[in-house]
Image (tube, coloured by chain):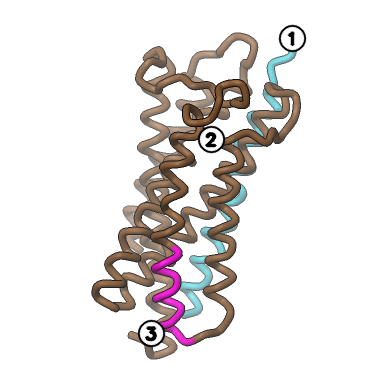
Chain colours: A cyan, B brown
Amino acid sequence: MYNYLEYFLAALLTVLLVLLVWFLININKIKKL
Amino acid sequence: MNLSLFILVMIVMISNLISIIFFTPMVPDQEWAQKIFYLHVPIAWSGFIAYFFVMISGIAYLISRNLKYDRFGHAAAEVGTIFTGLVLLTGPIWATPIWGKPWIWEPRLITTLVLFVIYAGYFILRNVGIYRQRVALISAMIGIIAFLDIPIIFASVTFWAAEIQSHPQVEMSKQPSGILTPFLFSLFAFTNLMLTMLFLKIKVLYLQDKEKNYV
């Protein structure tokens, strides 16, 4: 049974990864300033 | 940024992810691919709200010439562009199994891509190195003009001929409650996340301006 689970996981991981990188960059900037 | 606000938003986001994964109905034919909807659409809406803030702060800057509105607009533009970028990434991931190909040149996709490209230009302009007030003035004007694309994106599914559309033309209020309730919760969660990111970015920009003695 093909249920497209990998597409959902790909989308979810993309969203989480981009947001995580954004937060890390900006929290790092706050610490430096 | 307030740490308790950050933790609160994280709790809301984690509950949202649990709700999407475990408590949303499986739609026949699409199965898990349909659940991308609970990420894709709320991210798009929150991104548009951020761009709305860019327009409002652009108007406020033109009237007051106060750099705090420029920082607000700049922060909202960055968050809006991150969200629009995520829409343009999650869209093709969803489209690949359902439409058979990741990208179709149809009205809503083209108008969204245009919005993203306008804001890519906005950030290039912010970094060309002209003096601070001039950048703020031009950015405010671009932010106001760029917002004109958002009503076009909303109208694109009905404005152009139905034959060239790929997006479903279903109104959200007509969705069954099993889909509508978790969708509204996801919309709430992503809007909160967007606002948190906005506050964090405003603080970063404020500190940067302070370091360069603009504040």
Mark 3 lies on a secondary structure that is helix
Residue beneath disc 3 = B210
Determine the CA span between mark 2 and mark 1.
Answer: 25 Å
Using the image as rendered, state which of residue B70 and residue B26 is in the foreground.
Answer: B70
Mark 3 crowdedness (10 Å alpha carbons): few <14, some 14-19, many ≥20: few
Q: Nearer the viewer, residue B50 or B212?
A: B50
Q: Is residue B135 magenta?
A: yes
Q: Earlier in the sequence, mark 3 or mark 2?
A: 2
Give the CA separation, mark 3 to mark 2. 36 Å
Q: Are marks 3 and 2 in contact (CB under 8 Å)?
A: no
What's the CA distance linking mark 3 and mark 1? 58 Å
User: Which image quarter holds the C terminus of chain B?
Assistant: bottom left
- Kind of element beneath mark 2: helix
Residue B202 vs residue A24: left or right? Answer: left
Q: Position of residue B39 (x, y in %)?
A: 52, 34
Which chain does tag 2 point to?
B
Which chain's residue wears label 3? B
**Residue B207 higher or lower than B31, as above or below:** below
In the image, what residue occupies the spot 40% across and 83% down? B133
The residue indicated by pointer 1 is A1
Location of the N terminus of chain B (image quadrant) = bottom left
| Magenta region | B131-142
Q: Residues within 10 Å of mark 2 (few under 14, many from 20)?
A: many
Identified by mark 2, the residue type is His
Q: Residue at x 38, y 84 (%)?
A: B210
**What residue did someone put label 2 on?**
B40
Q: Residues within 10 Å of mark 1 (few under 14, many from 20)?
A: few
